[in-house]
Image: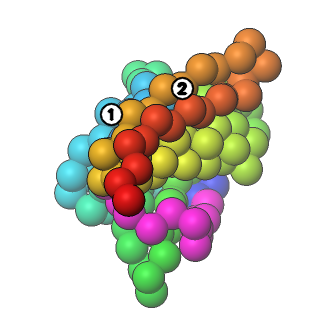
Amino acid sequence: MSHAVRHSFSDFKDPIVLARAFERLGWKVERDAKIRAWYQSKKFPYVAVNPNKNGYDWGFAINNGKIELEGDTSMMDEQVWKVLGRDFSHLKQAYSLEALSDWSKVNNGTMIETKAANGIVEVEIEMETFA
């Protein structure tokens, strides 16, 4: 059984950063496209295209200052959650890393990531400070 699910995230502020987070996880992001879904799909400003050719996509847009994701979930196929993480934990981690990378660049820093086998990511930022 599949159904449409909408999630609203106050922590996701920038759709471009979110697009890069999806890309970090292997999903291509398209602009002004329809999602692939079991139900009648609709058009979104951004669509994260599932790399699985038979998989469902996620659309996202800004609504009332928050980014909302909408997609089709399936109790029969865990593929989406394996990649994005339960409660979007992997997507949230990827978004945080992309946002931190932007912050580092704006502040003339260099960011180095190290990912452990258990999924924990260690981040080191080197910055030159000026007095």
Q: Amino acid at mark 2?
A: Glu
- As measured in the structure, the alpha-carbon distance from the residue carrying label 1 to the one carrying label 2 is 22 Å
Start and end of the magenta stretch? 5-19
Farthest residue, direction top? 117
Residue position for label 2: 113
Residue 115 position by quadrant: top right
Left or right, residue 121 beside residue 51 = right
Q: Earlier in the sequence, mark 1 or mark 2?
A: 1
Farthest residue, direction right? 118
Residue 81: x and y, percent?
Answer: 67, 36
Residue position for label 1: 28
Left or right, residue 42 beside residue 13 = left
Q: Which residue appears at 52% of the width and 53% of the height?
A: 71
Q: Amino acid at mark 1?
A: Lys
Describe the element under mark 2 as helix, strand or loop.
Answer: strand
In the image, residue 8 lies in the stretch drawn in magenta: yes
Farthest residue, direction left? 32
Query: Of 50 and 105, which appears nearest the observer?
Result: 105
Describe the element under mark 1 as helix, strand or loop.
Answer: strand
Q: Which residue appears at 69% of the width and 37% of the height?
A: 85
- Screen quadrant of the C terminus: bottom left
Left or right, residue 56 beside residue 43 = right
The mark closer to the camera, 1 or 2, is 2
Residue 3: x and y, percent?
Answer: 63, 55
